């Protein structure tokens, strides 16, 4: 049976709800602060965050390392999860800037909100939403960041169209993600597992 966009979304939500509430139960994918450090985050930045902000980290790279996030900018974190990248970005933009994290998993949104409060941040907010229908106005974002999320989206073109709708004309997307090589066979793709793996 072929996956449908709705079944893919449901599987992704279920998987990441579990990572939000029980991160140590995740066995198929690296999760947590050690994974973040291995992916190139500054260890002192990771250690400075509340443990609950890093324990559910499940990114695949460091999108903040792809370009400078400056004071006063407005940043959108696509698939913000428990908020680690959003919190780090909030420190970069300072009190004159703003970070909007968007995630479709309610458990992650709740955890991210608590994490931002624990970090004492008032310049970051988290919105429940689908990346194919971003809950942000047109042209307000200077930097969009994404960490291992686009590969989980069934309609990548629609997501990218939404990102570019939200970006200012001079805005940019800093994205870390995983890709399949063109030479991977259908059988190898099937053996990789479900969308949320």
Image (cartoon, rainbow, N blue to C red):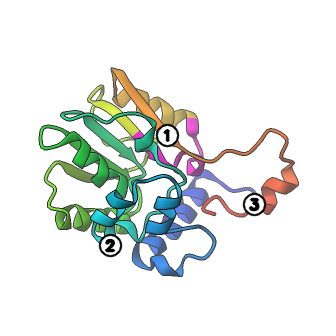
Residue at 28%, 64% in the rendered image = 49
Residue at 84%, 55% in the rendered image = 188
- Any magenta on residue 146? yes
Number of marks present in the image shown: 3
**Does dot 2 land on a helix, a strand or a loop?**
helix
Report the mark closest to the observer, 2 or 1: 2
| Quadrant in the rendering for residue 135 | top left
Horizontal side of residue 184 vs 110, given as left or right: right
Residue at 58%, 41% in the rendered image = 155
| Quadrant in the rendering for residue 139 | top left
The one nearer the camera, 67 or 97, is 67
Residue 72, position in %: x, y? 18, 33
Residue 65, position in %: x, y? 43, 42
Horizontal side of residue 87 vs 132, given as left or right: left
The one nearer the camera, 28 or 164, is 28
Horizontal side of residue 57 vs 12, given as left or right: left
Residue at 43%, 52% in the rendered image = 79
Residue 81, position in %: x, y? 40, 59
In this view, 55 is above or below 2: below
In this view, 72 is above or below 40: above
The residue that disc 1 covers is 175
Disc 3 residue crowd, few under 14, some 14–19, many 20+, Cα 10 Å? few
Q: Which residues are magenta?
A: 145-156
Q: Can residue 83 be seen?
A: no
First along the sequence among labels 2 and 3: 2
The residue that disc 3 covers is 192
**Does dot 3 land on a helix, a strand or a loop?**
loop
The one nearer the camera, 97 or 112, is 97
The residue that disc 2 covers is 51
Spatial separation of the CA atoms under disc 2 and disc 1: 24 Å
**Does dot 1 land on a helix, a strand or a loop?**
strand
Q: Quadrant of the N terminus?
A: bottom right
């Amino acid at each position: 049976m072929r996956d449908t966009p709705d079944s893919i979304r449901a599987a992704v939500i279920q998987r990441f709800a579990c990572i939000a509430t029980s991160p140590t139960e995740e066995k198929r994918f690296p999760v947590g602060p050690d994974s973040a450090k291995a992916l190139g985050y500054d260890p002192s930045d990771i250690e400075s965050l509340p443990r609950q902000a890093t324990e559910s980290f499940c990114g695949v790279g460091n999108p903040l390392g792809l370009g400078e996030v400056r004071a006063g900018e407005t940043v959108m974190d696509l698939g913000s999860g428990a908020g680690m990248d959003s919190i780090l970005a909030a420190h970069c933009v300072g009190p004159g800037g703003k970070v909007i994290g968007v995630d479709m998993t309610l458990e992650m949104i709740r955890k991210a909100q608590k994490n931002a409060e624990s970090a004492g941040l008032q310049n970051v907010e988290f919105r429940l939403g689908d990346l194919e229908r971003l809950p942000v106005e047109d042209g307000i974002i200077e930097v969009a960041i994404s960490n291992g999320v686009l590969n989980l989206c069934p309609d990548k073109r629609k997501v990218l169209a939404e990102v570019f709708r939200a970006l200012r004309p001079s805005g940019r997307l800093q994205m870390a993600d995983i890709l399949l090589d063109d030479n991977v066979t259908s059988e190898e793709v099937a053996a990789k597992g479900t969308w949320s793996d």
